[in-house]
Image (spheres, helix red, strand yellow):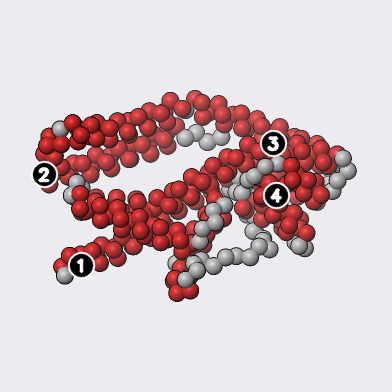
């Protein structure tokens, strides 16, 4: 009975840790993204697409609708282009946290606080996975955008209107950019003004280059001018920014590799000691002070990894 009570409390506490971890991780990422990509003025998102339910279970859907960070999580799923529901992701987070907490407590290698913190990190792992997918998708769009703008410029020169040129571009370029451009065309064909469709495009892809494109096209539509020359200039500017980013990443590659090696080296040494002479390693693991030292070392390694990456993370 006592053991059942302990695991019940651990389950409930892990759920709280899961929610806090997700909220903290999301707040950190959103502030960083806003600092990088926030343009002058705020774009309002418009969409004619149907929004999906948070969960297929009606009761759980009602519960999720009352949680504050759920809309942000739903937006993350849309930006990552993953066909998951918010309910599925939250259950994955809860399951990961409970499993890791159970393993950590039974292994008895960390103090109780360290086990709960490790469970919180495990619970937030689906969020970090989605953020990684979103980042890869954004990079793919940035790589496709200059060539797509060149194609759009040639389509405009051929005498096509902007909506028709964008439809041709959607058929020509590959995903993920083609998917987003197709949404613009579909929303326009369903009756949404082109201005609102472009605003929705910038909200779905909150990148500096994309917002440059949207602002340039909207400004040209209001003030007039040569759209062909505007697109060519914008394409060249984006290529120059991409080249500068590549140079910066090449110059900072040594720092990122150093962070990875310094973080992985203690883990490899500890694993080697565990397999070569387990009794020698268990002298540290079995002692209460040794568990605290292991936990402190893990925290220091993780902190050092993020500090080094922050140093070499140069904004362009």
In the depicted structure, whether residue 119 falls above or below residue 287? below
Q: Quadrant of the N terminus?
A: bottom left
Q: Earlier in the sequence, mark 4 or mark 1?
A: 1
Q: Earlier in the sequence, mark 3 or mark 4?
A: 3
In the depicted structure, whether residue 3 falls above or below residue 292? below
The residue nearer to you, when weighing 79 against 227, is 79
Say which element carries label 1.
helix
Q: Residue at x 83, y 42 (%)?
A: 156
Q: Are marks 2 and 3 in contact (CB under 8 Å)?
A: no
- Is 172 placed left or right of 244 in the picture? right
Nearer to us: label 4 or label 1: 1
Mark number displayed over residue 146: 3
Q: Are marks 4 and 2 in contact (CB under 8 Å)?
A: no
Say which element carries label 4.
helix
In the depicted structure, whether residue 236 falls above or below residue 182? above
Mark 4 to mark 2: distance in Å? 60 Å
Residue that numbered label 2 is attached to: 287
Q: Earlier in the sequence, mark 2 or mark 3?
A: 3
- Return the x and y of residue 16 as percentages of the image width and height: 33, 62
Mark number displayed over residue 4: 1
Say which element carries label 3.
helix
Q: Residues within 10 Å of mark 3 (few under 14, many from 20)?
A: many
Q: Residue at x 41, y 28 (%)?
A: 257
Q: Residue at x 78, y 45 (%)?
A: 168
Residue that numbered label 4 is attached to: 181
Mark 2 to mark 1: distance in Å? 27 Å
Q: Earlier in the sequence, mark 4 or mark 2?
A: 4
Q: Residue 228: which quarter of the image?
A: top right
């Amino acid at each position: 009975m006592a053991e059942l009570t302990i695991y019940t409390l651990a389950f409930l506490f892990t759920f709280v840790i899961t929610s806090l971890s997700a909220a903290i991780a999301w707040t950190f990422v959103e502030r960083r993204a806003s600092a990088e990509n926030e343009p002058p003025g705020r774009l309002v998102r418009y969409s004619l697409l149907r929004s999906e339910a948070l969960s297929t279970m009606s009761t759980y859907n009602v519960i999720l609708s009352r949680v504050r960070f759920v809309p942000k999580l739903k937006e993350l799923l849309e930006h990552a282009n993953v066909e998951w529901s918010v309910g599925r992701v939250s259950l994955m987070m809860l399951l990961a946290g409970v499993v890791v907490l159970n393993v950590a407590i039974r292994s008895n290698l960390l103090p109780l606080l360290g086990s709960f913190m490790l469970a919180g990190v495990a619970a937030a792992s689906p969020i970090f996975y989605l953020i990684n997918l979103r980042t890869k998708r954004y990079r793919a769009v940035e790589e496709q955008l200059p060539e797509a703008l060149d194609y759009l410029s040639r389509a405009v020169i051929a005498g096509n209107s902007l909506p028709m040129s964008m439809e041709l571009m959607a058929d020509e370029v590959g995903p993920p950019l083609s998917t987003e451009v197709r949404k613009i065309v579909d929303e326009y064909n369903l009756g949404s003004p082109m201005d609102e469709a472009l605003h929705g495009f910038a909200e779905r892809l909150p990148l500096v280059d994309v917002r440059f494109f949207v602002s340039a096209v909207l400004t040209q539509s209001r003030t007039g001018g040569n759209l062909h020359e505007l697109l060519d200039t914008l394409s060249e500017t984006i290529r120059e920014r991409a080249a500068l980013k590549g140079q910066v990443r090449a110059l900072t590659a040594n720092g990122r590799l150093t962070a990875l090696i310094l973080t992985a080296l203690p883990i490899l040494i500890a694993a080697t000691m565990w397999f070569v002479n387990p009794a020698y390693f268990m002298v540290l693991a079995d002692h209460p002070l040794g568990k605290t030292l292991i936990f402190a070392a893990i925290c220091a390694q993780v902190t050092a990894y993020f500090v080094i990456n922050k140093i070499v993370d140069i904004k362009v």
